[in-house]
Amino acid sequence: MCRLILAQGRFPTRAVLDAAVAMSCGRTADHDGPTDVHPNGWGAVWREDGAVHGLGVHRDVRPLAESWQESPVPGLTTDFLAIHARHATLPKNHGIQFTHPLHRDGELPWYFMHNGFLPTVHRLLGMKSSAFDSREYFDYAIPAGTDAVDAQRTLRLLDAIPPGGSSGNAIAVNPRAAYVIHWTSPQTTSPRYFGMQRLRTPDMTVLSSEVVPDLAPADQWEPLEPRTVHAFHIAPTETELSYS
């Protein structure tokens, strides 16, 4: 189980990073889930002029709260940033190969961050057993050759996953666009934990796993609609494209 945050627009990078740190430490936890602390590595992806494909990426297997200072993120000036703080569901899935954002090369590369546990999605890929559910979810929802995330198709794919998992909340990023998938299995025992929140101001849009009062007072946040996919341009001054 993990924490996610995405910001777009004109925002203070350090404040968004501090929000991710607060969530990773449990300082903003107000939910029904079993996990407050998310210490098993972290990662970020952001828009960066001059970078390969226009995206900067960072991964670290250490806890976010202990290692953010050694990353490039605090010094960034950018208009798009997504951060993932991880709590590994299975002890065996530790290490850089399990640290988000997961990556797929190609003519249009993708980066993928997941919050949830989907141990049955491998069946829909024809696999006998699951090796790493987040990678399998990535391959299932955004197969090789995909150039965009279609909301209705994605929700149909998620609804077809056999019971036994919790959530498919995710941030998927390519050089053209970023997508926030907000979907939780109706069988989950922690619906509040997997609910997401949105903050919209004249300068920025933030989607987050939790309300972070240091970014804005709680009454300025709104629950993100369940079963939605939100799309964002990866380009300066663009705002949220759509959701359905």
Image (cartoon, rainbow, N blue to C red):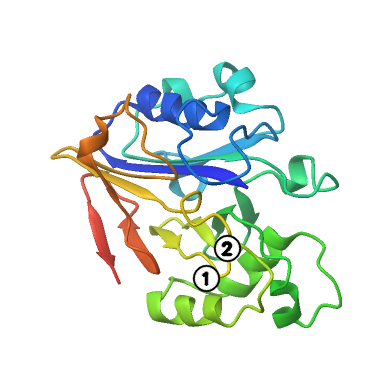
Task: Residue 143: tell me if it is visible.
Answer: no
Q: Would residue 184 be found to the left or right of residue 41 on screen?
A: left
x, y percentage for residue 23? Answer: 50, 32
The circle on residue 75 is: none
Q: Write down the quadrant of residue 39 in the picture.
A: top right
x, y percentage for residue 175? Answer: 44, 55
x, y percentage for residue 239? Answer: 22, 51
List the residue tagged with mark 1.
186
Tell me the amino acid under the disc marked 2: Thr
Q: Would residue 181 be found to the left or right of residue 99 on screen?
A: left
Query: Does residue 133 lie above or below 21 as drawn?
Result: below
Query: Does residue 107 lie above or below 46 as drawn?
Result: below
Question: Looking at the image, which residue sits at the far left?
Answer: 202
Who is closer to the viewer here, 147 or 4? 4
x, y percentage for residue 196? Answer: 40, 51
Who is closer to the viewer here, 204 or 72? 204
Q: Distance between the residues labelled 1 and 2?
A: 6 Å
Q: Residue at x 49, y 57 (%)?
A: 191
Q: Residue at x 55, y 63 (%)?
A: 168
Who is closer to the viewer here, 175 or 73? 73
Answer yes or no: do the residues labelled 1 and 2 have beta carbons within 8 Å? yes
List the residue tagged with mark 2.
188
Tell me the amino acid under the disc marked 1: Pro
Please tell me whether mark 2 sits on a helix, a strand or a loop. Answer: loop
